[in-house]
Amino acid sequence: MNNLIILPIVIPAIIGALLVFFAKSQKIQRFISVITMTAILFVSIWLSIDVYQNGIQVIALGDWPMPFGIPLVADMFATVMILLSSVVGIFCLFFAFRTIHPNRERFYFYPFYFFLIAGVNGTFLTGDLFNLFVFFEVTLIASYILIVHGSTAFQLRESFKYLAMNVFASMFFVVGVAYIYATTGTMNIAHIGLRVEELGQEGVLNVVAIVLLFVFAMKGALFPLYFWLPRSYTGPPAVVSALFVGLLTKIGIYAIIRVFTVIFNHEISFTHNIILILAGLTMLVGVLGAVAKYDFKSILAYHSVSQVGYMVMGLGIFTPLALAGAIYFMVHHSIVKAGLFLFSGVAEKITGTTDIKQMGGLLKTHPAFSWLFFVTAMSLAGIPPLAGFFGKFTLIVPGLSEGHYVVVAVSLIVGLLTLFSMMKIFSYSFWGRQKHSASQAKIKTRDLLVAISPFVVTTIAMGLAAEPIFSYFLDMAHELLDPSIYIESVLEE
Amino acid sequence: MSIVVGVSFMVGTYLIMARSLLSVVIGLNMLAHGSHLLLLTMAGLKTGAPPLLDRPETAFSDPLPQALILTAIVISFGITAFTIAIAYRTYKVYQTDDLEQLRGSPDE
């Protein structure tokens, strides 16, 4: 029993509701938001240290005995994700202060920001499958509102599609839950894991595994179900896209990794091979989209599709190093891609467009901005010593030693194409003839860059400190690959 | 019950394929109903007494599916309301409810 675990969910939920009453006052909203995000950050650091020292922490909500009650479980994987969500949340908040239009601020931007954080943290911490569905919905409802917030024509059109896709996927989540309840008679993830082990994972349980994979793949934008992502992420303001790419697609990937390590880990040759194939296709299709596009945000959005492939590739290979690499890649990608989306916001603010063919010469007028972008883009493309290199390296090495040559080859080609499309952005919008007017060239970006620089610093630091981070992540991967640790610590609570 | 579930899934799928915004919303709603009924059916219908402690019976029905479905219904109700609002705004802005015309810009 550890009451600390509930704080990352409860704090943002309460503060979000509170902020509704201060919607008209910009100053109070900003003040409360900063204090709250800082508090959440400290709680998640504290929780991470606690879990690292004392093992998995569990709280049974309402003090119902396990496996009947809803547990919140903080293991190392969950705490890393909580830490990630609070870091991305606090960095994006400062950028939001500088860029979000006051009208949007007055119309409940911050409350939904916090509801989103609450939902995401809940998804990471919950130990109950139905509760996972509920927290997915909490997150998604906040995301529906943030994505349509401002209701420009483009946003309305794309949001409706986003909404329809996600409602459809959620319905299948309920179907998957129904099948699981029918076969195992429990909703507790740890207990389901135990029951599946007793029953043997075959027949209908494999069907359930694929239904759940379908649901999470839709949320996480895996290969056949990625098509909603690029368009809907280009509509809203840069900070919302950054937050979505940092957190929202990650909850899908998190759920896939959680479900396929704790519950469905007995038929690896079937499920994990499907995951590997999907990973390869996702990488390839995503990066081809990025190569074809000439819109700053679209390129970034297609990239996030392709990089989702790397994360599930780690799960598909299913060795400790690959899993550690996948989680490292998730953290790296959240930070870097959120940063890049913010850079696209800055470029849009300077030039008034997101079309890279209409940009040019930014290097001359805004050198600091350009070089910071360059560093982040190189990290995404995987140039050592930045974080992206270590993420890819630790996926490719176990891929080779396990004999998955095709996926490894695909991932190397994709890495090359990533570099190519990043250079495309750089050469079109930063080099070349200056295409923005003299008055636009005078726009000061210092405040914005200060808000983004934490992302850049983090990715450099993650690259330089790869050794200690990886030893921590390897511990986590061992914990994930031995589900009995998770199951026992939940059921003994 | 299984047949009802199948029919509502069928109707829902058919309506989602339609071109009108509103029928997509109704189709999603039908799918939601189908999945809720599926949850109820899958968990087994009434098999014993109401699960109250002071009853003399020893076999009780499982109360959990009802709790799950209630939650799922509330969620789908809220989302449906929001979807209808978005659909209405989209219609007002674009002056059409035909999804073919909402595909996106011609150059994409």
Image (tube, rainbow, N blue to C red):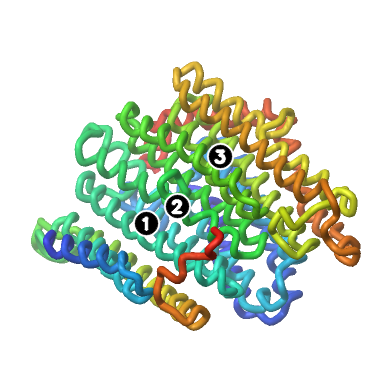
Q: Are marks 3 and 1 in contact (CB under 8 Å)?
A: no
Disc 3: host chain: A
- Residue A242's image quarter? bottom right
Q: From where the camera sits, is residue A486 visible?
A: yes
Q: Give the vertical position of A57 relative to A86 (above or below).
A: above
Q: Are marks 1 and 2 in contact (CB under 8 Å)?
A: yes
Q: How far from the left and from the top, in percent, is residue B7?
A: 16, 64
- A205 vs B89, nearest the viewer: B89
Discs 3 and 2 share one subunit = yes
**Mark closer to the chain start, 1 or 2:** 1
Q: How far from the left and from the top, in percent, is residue A435?
A: 82, 58
Query: Is A92 positioned to the left or the right of A487 in the image?
Result: right
Q: Residues within 10 Å of mark 1 (few under 14, many from 20)?
A: many
Q: How far from the left and from the top, in percent, is residue A225?
A: 42, 50
Q: Quadrant of the C terminus of chain A?
A: top left
Which residue has dot 2 on it?
A219
Q: State the mark number for residue A169.
A: 1
Q: Residues within 10 Å of mark 3 (few under 14, many from 20)?
A: some
Q: State the mark number for residue A51.
A: 3
Disc 1: host chain: A
- Residue B61's image quarter? bottom left
**Mark closer to the chain start, 3 or 1:** 3
Q: Give the vertical position of A466 relative to B49 (above or below).
A: above
User: Looking at numbered disc 3 in the image, what kind of residue is underneath it?
Assistant: Val
Query: Is A327 positioned to the left or the right of A347 in the image?
Result: left
Marks 3 and 1: which is nearer the front?
1
- A57 vs B73, nearest the viewer: B73
